[in-house]
Image (cartoon, rainbow, N blue to C red):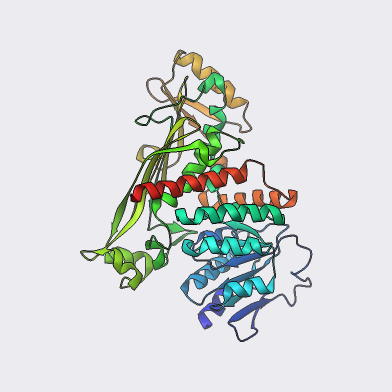
Amino acid sequence: MKKTAMLLLIPAMILSSCGSGGTKKQSTEGTGKSMEADYKVKLLTVDPGHFHAALVQKKMYPQVSPEVRVYAPEGPDVEQHLGRIASYNARGTDPTLWNEIVYRGPDFFEKMLSENAGNVVVLSGNNKKKASYITSSVNAGLNVLADKPMIISPEDWPGLQAAFETASRKGVLLYDIMTERFEITTILQKLLSQNSEIFGTLVPGTASEPAVSKVSVHHFSKIVSGSPLQRPAWFFDVEQQGEGIVDVTTHLVDLIQWECFPEQILNPSDVKLASAKRWPTIISREEFRGVTGMDEFPGYLEKDVKDGNIHVFSNGEMIYQLKGVWAKVSVTWNYMPPAGGGDTHYSVMRGTACDLVIRQGAEEKYVPTLYVENIKGSALPEFTEKLRAALGNLPYDSLMVESSGNKSLKINIPPRYRVSHEEHFGQVTERFLEYLDAGKLPDWEVPGMITKYYTTTSALKMARQ
């Protein structure tokens, strides 16, 4: 308990205990202002087992109360979450002023519902429980901002559909955190694909050469907010975290919908799966210890142990058609990135006039870089001038074009547009707050989410057959 208190202690905030149910509260005495008033949004963080929960609070928002209620079971997950928030409060540059009011206990979720102390539930943790958290929160008339994936099982998809219907009926918002929509090369890829003089039109593609491909490589060991990431042991259990084909692929399927069919209402009937597969990443006991701090595999992972290592089905691939356009999505998890590297993203959109390709490999120094390749129908000098003119009409200045080999150009992007993955969480949250203020999501968002999770969970069902 002393360790927790030290983590939460920040200037001008006094740590006090109240109640016998494990609640700890940071008082606002001396601030001269009640943090319970004057804010439209009050966050309720539930069972924060993933570091993304903290990234939502890496910055402050004018309409969000600095008092955040946290409800969680006793254990390291909530303590690590509070430690991250405390580090944001204590940083030297632009520190935050969050005041975490914490309830710890086995009845944490029931306590959250009964206290009714906020209006936005933030979910980022054990995905096995997330579907029920979403349903119960929406039924209680609470808005929900959920980390991906909202669901990890085909059996949960009908319940998610019902949750969206309930949210609409009760006038609350249910939204997932799609950070990759705010990455600059992806934004430019989307904008250029809508320029017929540059891109032409999206080709339909084939199963062997899809019109759109999204490939993502992630790593279990990484640095987050300047410190080595310690993951919970359950992160390696696909029954709790979800298999790779329903986890990170959520982002990739979302981007395909968002880029290829912008602001269009999509339906599950628009999806035709052709193939899906899954395969494991093999993690040794030493690697598991390195990222969790645990010497032994917990009992729930014994089912996945072979020859002393755990086999985690964190990798997956699907090939499908969306409104007649062939798409491929693939995700791979390795233990540790190469020196100087990190998580990487590869993306291609094939057009009748050129291909728009994002690469993030060693040649790009692991920085996402947008290329215009396979230029057709124009001489390179003529096309280069058209591309410069098109870039000049976009709401981003100082975008530069340089040659990158035969029929290929590279777009150089100023550093000021290079927003980190961690900062994207603040951007998504700001967008969600705009929707809250408007009282509704765009008409295409809910059908898009329903279609997206139909795609990922159907792919898992196919891959397991």
Q: Is residue 173 visible?
A: no
Residue 113, image x, y percentages: 65, 71
- Left/right placement of residue 38 relative to residue 231 reads right
Query: To which quarter of the image does residue 386 belong?
Result: top right
265 to 178, vertically: above or below? above
Front position in the image: 75 or 158? 158
Q: How many marks?
A: 0
- Left/right placement of residue 23 relative to residue 404 reads right
Say which residue appears at 37% left-offset and 64% top-offset: 291
29 to 214, vertically: above or below? below
Front position in the image: 121 or 340? 121
Residue 444, image x, y percentages: 63, 40
The residue furthest bottom is: 20
Q: Is residue 36 visible?
A: yes
258 to 235, vertically: above or below? above
Say which residue appears at 69% left-offset and 49% top-offset: 435
Residue 25, image x, y percentages: 64, 78
Residue 378, image x, y percentages: 47, 13
Say which residue appears at 49% left-offset and 66% top-offset: 49
233 to 440, vertically: above or below? below
